[in-house]
Image: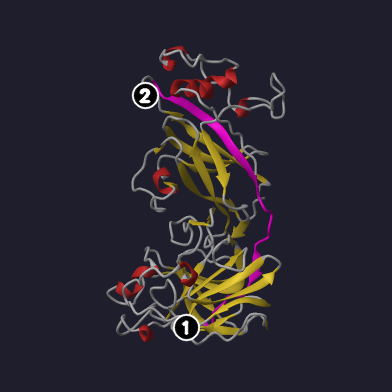
Amino acid sequence: MTGKRAASRGAPRIAVLLAVVLATTGCTADPTDPEDPSESAPAPSASPTETEAGEPQAGGLDAGTRFTPLMSSLITDPMPVTGTDDKIHVTYELLLTNATTLPFRLDGLEVVDPESEATLLVEDDERLPQTVTRLGASAGGEPGSGSVLIDPAETWIAWLDVQLDADAAVPATLEHRAQGAVVVPEGEPREFDVVIGTTPVDAGPATAVGVPVADGIWMMSEGCCRDDTHHRRGFAPVNGQGLVPQRFAIDFYLLDEEHRTWEGDPSQITSYFSYRQPIVAAAAGTVVRALDGLPNTTALPEPPPIPPIEETVGNHVVIEIAPGLYALYGHMDPGSVRVEVGDRVEKGQELGLIGSSGNSTTPHLHFHLQTAETFFPSDGVPYVFDEFELLGWVPERIWDDDLGLQPTGVLPFEEFEPSVRRAELPLDRTVIAVDQSE
């Protein structure tokens, strides 16, 4: 990961602005000059795309080197994964920090393949308030359209999902370009269209595993990739590091033939079809964590109080399936965990039963792959399931917090032409059929 960054130290506000605007022209500014910069500053130099790549500038700098008002950094190494929409998804986050002493108005953000110069993703004012959110504010963003104003020293998160055709080549590198302006107290805003960093793409492939539940019809809730879900946008600052451990997580809910998730009294845990369904190992490996004995929620159908950090995923099992790669199975029923630390398990082996322990509203299995033995701190990585049948999806956003609060247990359902899928990640709210006998 690389980026073009610069900072001005100890200079008055106008001097900082002038440094940013004028540095690429070879000019310098008098920090004591009170003149309105909008009246005297020459136009910014050509953007990096207007200069031959690799051609040195005066002073030996690479072409395109310039001061930028924004600094960027990444939380993860992007890796492609194929979804059930017949698209390849490169899903990750870009942290944007305003490095000036003046507000920066972000008007657009682009992801580009620097080799082909093809624009792969455009986040403009139509979706920007939902896609770019302030760190510490709601990850769902703000309704409506328009620009985003990043105050001095603020950090915002761009939730990015680059989508490629299934037969497209995945770029080796992604380049990030920002359009916007430094907002001057007096005078016209200073416009920018700049490269704010590049990152290599991990070629993968995403790890293939089995579906971790028994036979039946299952809804894939809170999944990847573009929508705002508490998994996809679950930013977690842990031990001083910003992480998204649930980036590709799925909550599994069992449905009946009428696409219901529960029947009877939603305040009773036994009314939910997912309750005490078998959880099976998605891949062979060694158990590195196994916790049992935490109670199920007693708050049904209301969300439970937020538990301590160590109880977030409730009773759970973590299995190392490859060096540095771990599968997590969460919210198990108390007393149902059937494995211990050190056990060697085989793919398809029963690990326990679905419950509603930890930070869980209604019974479900939380599953994802991660880079550490523990849920916190870790990074969520993509994966695909070996085989399943795609049946349809739930077109309306129903957060799992609300399933027990619905008038009935019936979910809205849009049926697809059933199709067997292999080596794909079921996307958010898709409904699949599982047959472990195949």
Q: Position of residue 26 (x, y in %)?
A: 60, 16
Where does label 2 land, which residue?
185
- Return the residue nearer the eye: 238 or 399: 238
Report the Cα–Cα distance between label 2 and label 1.
59 Å
Label 1 sits on residue: 333
Image-quadrant location for residue 264: bottom left
Quarter of the image for the N terminus: give it: top right
Q: Which residues are magenta?
A: 188-215
Q: Characterize the local packing of mark 2: few (<14), some (14-19) or many (20 or more) Cα atoms within 10 angstroms.
A: few
* Front one among 307 and 137: 307
Residue 223 appears left or right of 82: left
Q: Where, by quadrant of the figure, is residue 253 drawn? A: bottom left
Q: Nearer the viewer, residue 207 or 237?
A: 237
Q: From where the camera sits, is residue 423 visible?
A: no
Task: Say if 140 sits above or below 22 in the image.
Answer: below
* Mark before the other along the chain sequence, 2 or 1: 2
